[in-house]
Amino acid sequence: LANNSASSPSTHSLLRRGYSSESAPERKVTVLGAAGGIGQPLALLMKLNPLVSHLSLYDIAGTPGVAADVGHINTRSEVVGFMGEEQLGKALEGSDIVIIPAGVPRKPGMTRDDLFNINAGIVKSLCTAIAKYCPNALVNMISNPVNSTVPIAAEIFKKAGIYDEKKLFGVTTLDVVRAKTFYAGKARVPVEGVNVPVVGGHAGITILPLFSQATPKANNLSGEDLTALTKRTQDGGTEVVEAKAGKGSATLSMAYAGAIFADACLKGLNGVPDVVECSFVQSSITELPFFASKVRLGKNGIEEVLGLGPLSDFEKQGLESLIPDLKSSIEKGIAFANKS
Ligand code: NAD
Ligand code: LMR
């Protein structure tokens, strides 16, 4: 083997891959809603992540096919598909991270809140199972309306006596991904190096990109440009819903964003220092009990919820206007979880 690796670059890189897998700890990642529009490409991207050792794919239908397909990819993780409620416990047992893109997507003309009636119930039952089968897992909530589904999850976990605010995340990474893309386009800077925090929540005006803190700094953007960039980021989801014309909402960019966020959680769990991403979490940086801002990830989930930093007057106004909207979505989620 030593000879082979010395003489053949491909064997050499295979061995190196072997080493890196062996040194990374075992991590089980479970995707709930894995056969859906987001679930399938997210399953693919998590299969490509060398930090994952076990990939568990659960849905009410279709998962055996997705698991068989993704499972043939020659990367580290073992893939198992689970289908139907009676297999949910097995899917969840031992999970380090549970990613939830289960639920219905929007059609043109709908708000995210219009999904509440169906998705709130789905999230409630999935979180009840998480509390039972993997109470220590980090939960990455993608299902909309995130501004309400995260509070629902928190209440369900509290009722089950397992709530740990450091382990519950609303995934708002797609807002950051969009803000970076749109900013780079307008400022004409290479997108790879761009950073833009996005705070608040994940619907309409509750999405507040902080372009005043964007890096690299751009001196070529007017106030009008910044207003337009803000609006485009806030309406990014609707832009995709309308372009898909009834065939759902963002799936591919969301899978990418979900994979970025799960990777950050895995790195945090594995002790990589200074892993920071924006997420909608329990928070005391505003008057609201949940708020999206930068969070530092660590071995137990959230290590620190970071403050907002200096805001421009335009952003201060945006923050003030989003509070009532976000407050009522949070309260709606809490009320739903406690009514039965
Ligand atoms: P989809 O309809 O294509 O897929 C949803 C999947 O969930 C389906 O496969 C369905 O069978 C499954 N499902 C339904 N009930 C389930 C249950 N009880 N248990 C397990 N699986 C269940 O929808 P999609 O396009 O993948 O979107 C999923 C959700 O993600 C929607 O609510 C959408 O609004 C949301 N979303 C959020 C963001 C974000 O930024 N957070 C971005 C895009 C979409
Ligand atoms: C998004 O931002 O793309 C998602 O929240 C889906 C949607 O309904 O817009």
Image: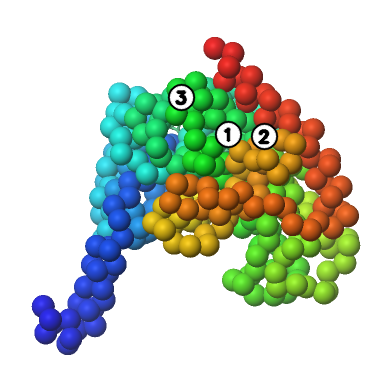
Residue 239, disc: none
204 to the left or right of 44: right
The x, y position of residue 336, in whole percent, is 60, 19
**Res 67 → quadrant:** top left
What amino acid does circle 2 point to?
Pro
Residue 202 in percent (x, y) is at: 66, 42
Image side of residue 301 versus residue 316, left or right: left
Q: Position of residue 74 (x, y in %)?
A: 26, 60
Label 2 or label 3, whichever comes before in sequence order: 3
Label 3 SS = loop
Residue where numbered disc 3 is placed: 161
Mark 3 Cα-neighbour bin, 10 Å: few <14, some 14–19, many ≥20 = few
> What amino acid is found at the position of numbered circle 3 in the picture?
Gly
Q: Residue at x 17, y 81 (%)?
A: 5
Residue 150 disc label = 1
**Mark 1 close to ligand 1, CB under 8 Å:** no
Q: Nearer the viewer, residue 16 or 316?
A: 316
Front-most of 340 and 300?
300
Disc number at residue 289? 2
